[in-house]
Amino acid sequence: MTEDSTALTELPGWLPSLIRSLKLGYRAGPLLIAVAFGTTVAAAVPDALLALGFSMLGTNPAAALAMLAVLGVGGWLLATVSSRANRRFADRAAIVVEQHVACIQSTITTLEHHERPDVMDRISVLRDHAEALSELYQQLFWTLGALARLVITVGLLMAANPWFGLLGVIAVPTVLVSTWRSDAERRAEEAGAQHDRLAKHMFELGTTPGPAKEIRVFGVQDKIKDLRQRAWWRRHRTLSRARWRTAWWQAGAHALFGLAYLVAIASVVHQPTALLLVLAAGGRLAQYVANTVQTTQFFRTIWLDVSRRLAWLEDYAAAQRDAATQSPPDRLDTGIRLENVTFRYPGTTRTVLDDVTVTLPAGTTVAVVGENGAGKSTLVKLLCRLYSPTAGRILVDGVDLAAIDPQQWRQRVSGSFQDFFPFEYTAAESIGVGDLPRIDDPVALDAAAARAGGVPVPLPTQLGVTWENGVDLSHGQWQRVALARGFMRDEPLLLVLDEPTSALDAATEDALFERYARAKGPGVTVLVSHRLATVRMADLILVLDGSRLVECGSHAELMAADGRYAGLYRIQARAYGRTGS
Ligand SMILES: Nc1ncnc2c1ncn2[C@@H]1O[C@H](COP(=O)(O)OP(=O)(O)OP(=O)(O)O)[C@@H](O)[C@H]1O
Ligand SMILES: [Mg+2]
């Protein structure tokens, strides 16, 4: 992670964030946003001027009625056009904004942000509100409209008696208190975000099919319910404390305004025109202040905040964007070398890989063995550049991997991961995403499927129970699809196979690796497996133990050395009835 991104903890200022969101909205529909803005703000004018019409009823009823009719019809027309334009614009902006949020997240090249709770909290709030962000614009226009009504109404009152302008001043504390209140609520929401995340996670656990079996077998329903409830209450308590603390101040500010309004009415009780104006405009002033405060508050707490989070995510992703531009070699000549590679997951203190130095020669299969948690999958993730080493470096034909453009590097990497994802597409697409340019190429798909020892269903089959006609697969069958996906790319520089056959039967695994060993390409293949009968076929075997590389050599060399690997091999050979080395 770059230093810049670590320092990015503050949300950007509200004005630049708002301007950035507006630019995004402008891109979604320049004409629509202009019409929506113009009509929403313009609709405020006739509405606010109605008070003037009312005040003239006593002195010039005909003109007053004509004025009220024009203002009423004009206001209605503008309000209708404004609501249509805002609706259509929001629909269009929703697509643009959601796509934008998803795109920024996918441009973050490493997975490190998934390890940072502060980042995850921010993203989780943003994800929840992202689709609603499209309404930001309408909210902003409404807020401006409410403000315009307020200004016009204060102007009318001041025209009758400059002292009545004070009503506008006395309304200020209500706005200030509301602003402060929404800030306090936002801070409380952020402080309770981890409880919120936990509560949601528990809800997902209790309601999604994945964990359903284990939850029932182990009878943990009550525990989950309890944890969820406690997390939810903790979040609620933080928020509700903040709300109560600020509510008294808000009530006081509104009471002060009410008192001033009564004094104003009492002062003009003997002047009919002024009284009508104060009653109409003053009464509306209270309503406009409330509206302005409400929309401003709503705008500040939700929309402005989401807009700031979006700007923050854009900055975060930009800071994460790798400046590395070097292209990977077309072909691997010497291989991949790890030099004193040490790694700790971001935000943790435990060293997962400690000073690992080894060369993975081009054109070989390198097996990595070690007990659970020894750091095998972590090593694979470092090679894929999903994380950067905490210390040391990885060299690809002598070039530091950190200097190679991660996107280009990953185009030359392929593989199958221990925690592979079951893409619920058709079988063909689920395999084809392993090499997008050839997703429709039947020859490539067949070749990949054959390399994986065949796929369990015909290629056009829709996979996944989410779909009405979707077929669900067993874990091992999903793994075969993932394996075929990993074999889509021709001659990758690096092929990682992290326990790619853990769910396959031993005979299939044996056949697969024998076939693979005969057809392997010029790149490096890294194979992680607990089955040493498979591992023995590798050209080089790395043994990880407690984060350190403790042995390294061919099967024959390691057996001759009679160390940790030889011991493990004998145990497994005995268990499976194999003998000798
Ligand atoms: N995302 C993560 N954040 C923090 N720590 C992690 C993360 N992933 C793994 N670890 C820790 O790193 C260590 C090594 O994990 P790794 O997944 O590399 O082990 P492994 O050798 O692949 O184990 P297994 O054989 O079970 O797959 C473990 O102690 C694990 O707790
Ligand atoms: Mg692993």
Image (tube, helix red, strand yellow):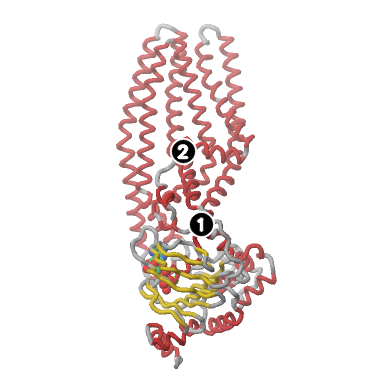
- Report whether 382 appears left or right of 45: left
Q: Position of residue 479 (x, y in %)?
A: 54, 72
Amino acid at the residue labelled 1: Thr
Instruction: Give the quarter of the figure containing the N terminus.
Output: bottom left
> Dot 1 surroundings within 10 Å: few (below 14), some, or many (20 or more)?
some
Residue sitting nearer the eye, 213 or 126: 126
- Looking at the rendered image, the disc whose residue lies closer to the viewer, 1 or 2, is 1
> Quadrant of the rendered structure where residue 519 is?
bottom right
Q: Secondary structure at mark 2?
A: helix
Which quarter of the rendered image does ligand 2 occupy? bottom left
Contact (Cβ within 8 Å) of mark 1 with mark 2 = no
Q: Earlier in the sequence, mark 1 or mark 2?
A: 1
- Residue at label 2? 304
Q: Is mark 2 within 8 Å of ligand 1?
A: no
Question: What's the residue at 45%, 37% (across, down)?
Answer: 14
Q: Secondary structure at mark 1?
A: loop
Furthest toward the front, the residue is 398
Residue type pointed to by label 2: Leu
In the displayed structure image, the side of residue 90 where residue 269 appears, left or right? left
Q: Which residue is mark 1?
A: 109
Figure quadrant of residue 93:
top right
Q: CA distance from mark 1 to mark 2?
A: 28 Å
Residue 569 is situated, as x and y percent measured from the top left of the image, at 42, 86
Q: Is 242 left, or right, of 56 in this rendering?
A: left
Q: Name the image quarter holding residue 461.
A: bottom right
- Where 211 falls versus 203 (above or below)? below
Q: Which mark is residue 561?
A: none
Please tell me whether residue 46 is drawn above or below residue 440 in the rendered image: above
Residue 449 position, x and y percent, is 62, 74
